[in-house]
Image (cartoon, grey):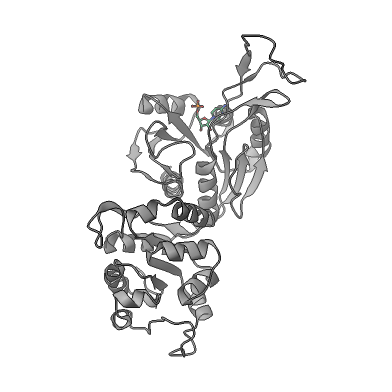
Amino acid sequence: MLKGKTIVVGVCGGIAAYKVVDVVSRLRKQHAQVHVIMTEHATRFVAPLTFQSLSNNPVVTDMFAEPKTWDVEHISLARKADMMLVAPATANIIGKVANGIADDMLSTVIMATTAPVLFVPAMNYAMYENLVVQENISKLERFGYRFMEPDTGVMAAEGESGKGRLPEPEKIVQEVLKTVTVDQDLKGRRILITAGPTREPMDPVRYISNHSSGKMGYALAEAAAGRGAAVTLVSGPVNIQKPENVSTVDVTTADDMLEAVLARQADQDIFIMVAAVADYKCASIADKKIKKTQDRFTVEMVKNPDIAKEIGKIKGNRILVGFSAETNDLESNARSKLDSKNLDMIVANDVTQEGAGFGTDTNIVKIIRKDGTINEFPIMSKLDVAREILDEINKLMVNG
Ligand code: C5P
């Protein structure tokens, strides 16, 4: 399956380095060309000769050593790679790449490549949970670097249990396959995504809104653009970075969002409504700041337009996907939204579950299709959830 693919494997200095020997051997069995770069610390755990024999290529350890052949220098490896796998990825390499430090061969090649890079972190659980490490991972994910979640279990070195173990080699190879074979399966498709909250003003200084962070919609936009789609992202006010290669339209209220969506709907093939649109807006907006003169204060609110429903009325045979954030009766609530809004698919999540819903980097979802079939997914990063949703949309387009 990996014939003709070149995979550059970066091995860092962690006890789990020995497991990567098996990963390299499996990649070779799949007929990949493998080049291993080891950090200096990695060479204390596994001898470079082991990787050299298995990969059938010289192992690069030192940036300033005489190259074995002039072809094997950092730029050449960076260019040659169809993807890079960094395993075990230590807090150190993650921190270096997240901060633009390229002070050895591995960090330099990671920085110089334009190929997808998959990090497989493995470290002590407290280190993995350290906010500095988590922040670096989030930053790199935003920039399009991929991460595998470490396994939970007893750590080789400490005998303690926690999240930080390197996943089994077979799982890593599966992920490599997914990364390297991501093709442009959405090329030529035009996708409109709504994301984030809306803000409904009360007076010139106050508004009513919700906790939506925009992360799920932005992850979808990024993943869809990476697969070749022309993506328009209509976004409410959020504090996250705009995805690359996506045309973003900033809006504030539900009315603005509807207007922006309707103005662009004719050109789209697929709609994914992720925005947490406020259901109600203030019946009137005070033109001056409301003073605290009364003990009780009542705001009259009126219903906002339902953007997904409006698109449902005019979509024809184009695909419309909705989201359903629920606190109870997840499936039945999601199904009735699917029907009432004329959706082809709904992504349901119980926002009361830990690791799901607003603000988190992960989500736990069920994808329910119009024909009643349901796919349930475990907790995964929002980027991985996005990939699964796009896979489902692709299946719908192929199978109808
Ligand atoms: O009805 P509810 O808000 O739970 O429906 C959620 C789905 O409908 C989401 O896909 C959301 O983006 C969309 N929606 C919308 N306009 C609204 C309310 C919800 O597009 N006013």
Q: How many marks?
A: 0
Report whether 175 appears left or right of 79.
left
Report whether 262 appears left or right of 54.
right
Q: Which of the pair 14/120 is nearer the observer?
A: 14
* Residue 123 point in image, percent of width and height: 34, 60
Residue at 35% from the left image edge and 53% from the top image edge: 126
* Whether residue 126 is visible: yes
Residue at 64% from the left image edge and 49% from the top image edge: 247
Report whether 212 appears left or right of 380.
right
Residue at 77% from the left image edge and 20% from the top image edge: 288
Residue 210, above or below 33: above
Residue at 22% from the left image edge and 57% from the top image edge: 159
* Residue 243 point in image, percent of width and height: 58, 51
Identity of the residue furthest to the right in this view: 287
* Whether residue 181 is visible: no
Rendered image quadrant of residue 314 = top right
Residue 55, above or below 243: below
Quadrant of the snapshot with the C terminus? top left
Rendered image quadrant of residue 324 = top left
Q: Which of the pair 253/66 is nearer the observer?
A: 66
Q: Which of the pair 273/239 is nearer the observer?
A: 239
* Residue 179 point in image, percent of width and height: 42, 61
Quadrant of the snapshot with the N terminus? bottom left
Identity of the residue furthest to the top in this view: 295
* Residue 341 point in image, percent of width and height: 50, 27
